[in-house]
Image (tube, grey):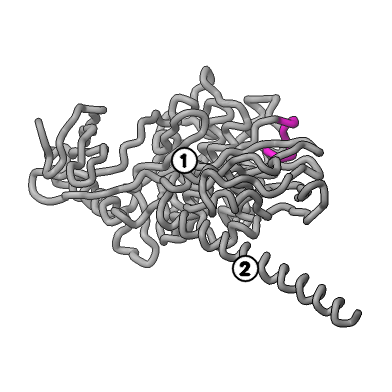
Amino acid sequence: MDSVGKYQIVKELGRGATSTVYLALDPFNNQQVALKLFNPEVLRHSTSGKAFRKQLAIEASLAGKLSHPHIVKIYDAMLEGEMNYMVMEFFEAETLEKYGDVEHLLSFSRVAEIIYKCCKALEYAQYQGVIHRDIKPANILISGESDIKISDFGAAMLENQQTTQVSGVGSPAYMSPEQIKEQALTHQTDIYSLGVTMYRLLTGRVPFEASNRYSMIYQIMNINPPPPSNYRPDLPPAMDAIVQRAMCKDVAYRYQTWEEFAGELVAFISEGLPQHEVIFDTEKFDTVRSLPFFKEFSDVELWEVLRISEWHKVAKDETLLREGEVGQNFYIIATGSVRVLKQGRLLSLLHEGDCFGEMAHVFGKDSKRSTNVISKTDVKLIELNPDVLALASASCRFQFAEAFSRILARRLALANTRLSHLLSDELEE
């Protein structure tokens, strides 16, 4: 097979009972994509085929709707006649299924990072009116340390579109009690399933194990699972508590929001782990979202900031920029304070959320630094290279331009105030 529709087939990536996935080329956008070609025999089946086609229609309806760095994008779909396929973002990765085995368990910090990113992706999906309904390790892709993407929205429920629901979807071991009862579902069903996923990543087993579906359902409905620390005794109590709360059978005691769930993961990483040199993505994202500089950035744009920036920990009294040296990178203070000096004279103090070095970016590569900048306390710095920023999305670049405009306006107003005070003092003399 050389092509499917307008897409040129490069090679086969994988094959299953319902579909074959190919690496393909979109010649119009000149980009690689993953093309999932569905088995026509499955779709022709009198009973299961109808339900399967309905699930495909749900997922196809999300094309262009979910645009988040931790969700696999759906670009295109064709669900008519004999040739049925879906075109998705190509993400070279493996599923988390492997890391749910005892022999391949991840560190506590990596599990917290992965689950945090899932929380933020599913929070975004919720804001778009989408509930996944089939969260499990096999539907979460991972590349590198913790670059993840959630896939397979075929079981998704679109809020306010009740006719799109398909009963009985989901994987039994990861289904919430309310999903089993076929009650009205909210994002809290995904919170439960993500809690089960976290349980498995930490212990190498699911909370309930059964020889048949009915036994599994009974346990989910009626039995409290043993805490993860029963199987991994070195698990910190804080993480034990996070998993158990996410998996509460009663939604009133489960996490009410994704932000609440994610917030406890951030607290665990920053407070529950030994001091570490690495700045985790959980900490980075939580930090940038709180800084005034980034107040107008969307969550998607903030993830892009993390991708294009470098983060540094700097000790007190270190020189960060030198007067007269050439440079173009600019910096945003994540935590701490710095002193700005001109020929040894203190001009100002800058604190978290403030920016410095941006004038070199504004005036060009050969611009010389006009001041010295020295850390007043231990600081965490966000460093950005204008050449890398130039390759960012248009919306991200726009937000940086707007943030610089606010900074320059504030500094101009401050300079005018100082000048008016000086003139007033001269007149009085």
Q: Magenta region: which residues?
A: 269-276
> What quarter of the picture does the N terminus occupy?
top left
* Label 1: element kind: helix
* Nearer the camera: disc 2 or disc 1: 2
Q: Nearer the viewer, residue 79 or 215?
A: 79
What residue occupies the far right of the structure in this picture? Answer: 429
101 versus 225 height, above or below: above
Residue at numbered disc 2: 409
User: What secondary structure predominates along the stretch shown in magenta?
Assistant: loop
One can see residue 378 in this view = yes
Name the quadrant containing residue 269: top right
Q: Tell me the crowding category of disc 2: few under 14, some 14 to 19, or many 20 or more residues within 10 angstroms, Cα based.
A: few
- Residue 96's disc is none
- x, y percent for residue 344: 82, 46
Name the quadrant containing residue 280: top right
- x, y percent for residue 235: 68, 29
Query: Who's the residue at 73% across and 45% down the image?
Result: 373
Q: Is residue 135 left or right of residue 37?
A: right
Q: Tag 1: residue type?
A: Tyr
Q: Nearer the viewer, residue 407 or 9?
A: 407
Q: Tag 2: residue type?
A: Ala
- x, y percent for residue 84: 15, 45
105 versus 147 height, above or below: above
Query: Who's the residue at 81% across and 38% down the image?
Result: 317
Q: Is residue 314 left or right of residue 55?
A: right
Residue at numbered disc 1: 174
Sequence-first tag of 2 and 1 = 1
